[in-house]
Amino acid sequence: MASNPSTDAGEITLAVRDLRTSFHTREGVLPVVDGVSFTLRRGQVLGLVGESGSGKSVTGFSIMGLIDPPGRVEGGQLLFQGRELRDLSPRERRSLQGDRMAMIFQDPMATLNPVLDIATQMIEAVQAHRRVNRSQARQLARDTLASMGIPSPDERLDAYPHQLSGGMRQRVAIAIALLHGPDLIIADEPTTAWT
Ligand SMILES: Nc1ncnc2c1ncn2[C@@H]1O[C@H](COP(=O)(O)OP(=O)(O)OP(=O)(O)O)[C@@H](O)[C@H]1O
Ligand SMILES: [Mg+2]
């Protein structure tokens, strides 16, 4: 990773130190992420590059606390704004996720519920972290869609995911990640499904 002198003085948003994540399979322990370290300062963009299966997505899931058995974060530090994420209770971690930190998944249906219209999902996402009424939440959802250049945001809000194109679904998933202006966005190949 190249360092950027203009931002080196900035505060550290995320420091990953010697992260190790493994999958415990019948064939044995698979060390997928083995000693990954990097530092991300406020305003910096960092790209992870590596061949398919090298552990880029698992690194992102580890930071977001989304590793489920048989996977396990075995070691290392995940310092977000100076707080060790691994020491937080599940509740504290959930409250940070989707608010101060957000993840955009390669597959927008990892974010979207197929049986709920977009408005319902975005309003729930707003109200999970803000004390606002439904109409204020809908306004924030509409503003976020509009700020991304999405045409006819009200029509999008009234649609179900299957009524949107793949690219539009991904834009909506990105809008949900951006709703609260997070300090950290983990984008896992967010444009792969963008057509
Ligand atoms: N639930 C799981 N159980 C067992 N192994 C897993 C599991 N999830 C991921 N892996 C393994 O972890 C390794 C890394 O996967 P990961 O998805 O992080 O790769 P990637 O670098 O994101 O690849 P791509 O560029 O294809 O997205 C792979 O070998 C994969 O088989
Ligand atoms: Mg991946």
Image (spheres, grey):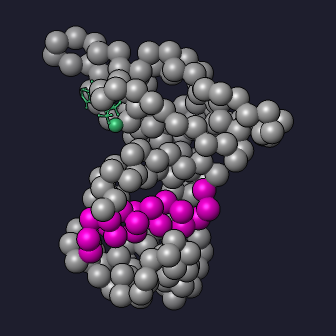
- Can residue 27 be seen? yes
Q: Is residue 105 visible?
A: no
- Please provide percent x and percent y for residue 30: 29, 15
Image quarter where the N terminus lies is top right
- Residue plotted at (34% across, 59% down): 194
Q: Nearer the viewer, residue 50 or 72?
A: 50
Q: Quadrant of the C terminus?
A: bottom left
Q: Position of residue 133 (x, y in %)?
A: 54, 84
Give the camera-side residue of 73 and 44.
Answer: 44
When the figure is inspected, residue 60 is found, relative to residue 73, above or below; the finding is below
Q: What is the magenta range? A: 164-182
Q: Quadrant of residue 51?
A: top left
104 w.r.t. 14: above or below: below
Residue 64 magenta: no
Q: Residue at x 26, y 19 (%)?
A: 24
The residue drawn where x is 45% and y is 77% is: 150
Q: Quadrant of ligand 1?
A: top left
**Is 147 drawn above or below residue 45 in the view shown?**
below
Observer-nearest of 25 and 57: 57
Point out residue 62 in the picture as x, y percentages from the top left corner. Answer: 45, 33
Residue extending farthest to the top is: 28
Q: Characterize the magenta stretch by its predominant secondary structure.
A: helix
Q: Position of residue 32 (x, y in %)?
A: 35, 20
Q: Residue at x 54, y 67 (%)?
A: 179
Q: In the current view of this chain or complex, which residue is farthest to the left?
A: 26
Instruction: Examine the structure image and report whether residue 169 is included in the region drawn in magenta.
Output: yes
Viewer-closest of 145 and 114 = 145
Residue 45 drawn above or below residue 153 = above
Q: Which of the 4 quarters of the picture holds residue 167?
A: bottom left
Left or right? Give the position of 117 relative to 135. Answer: left
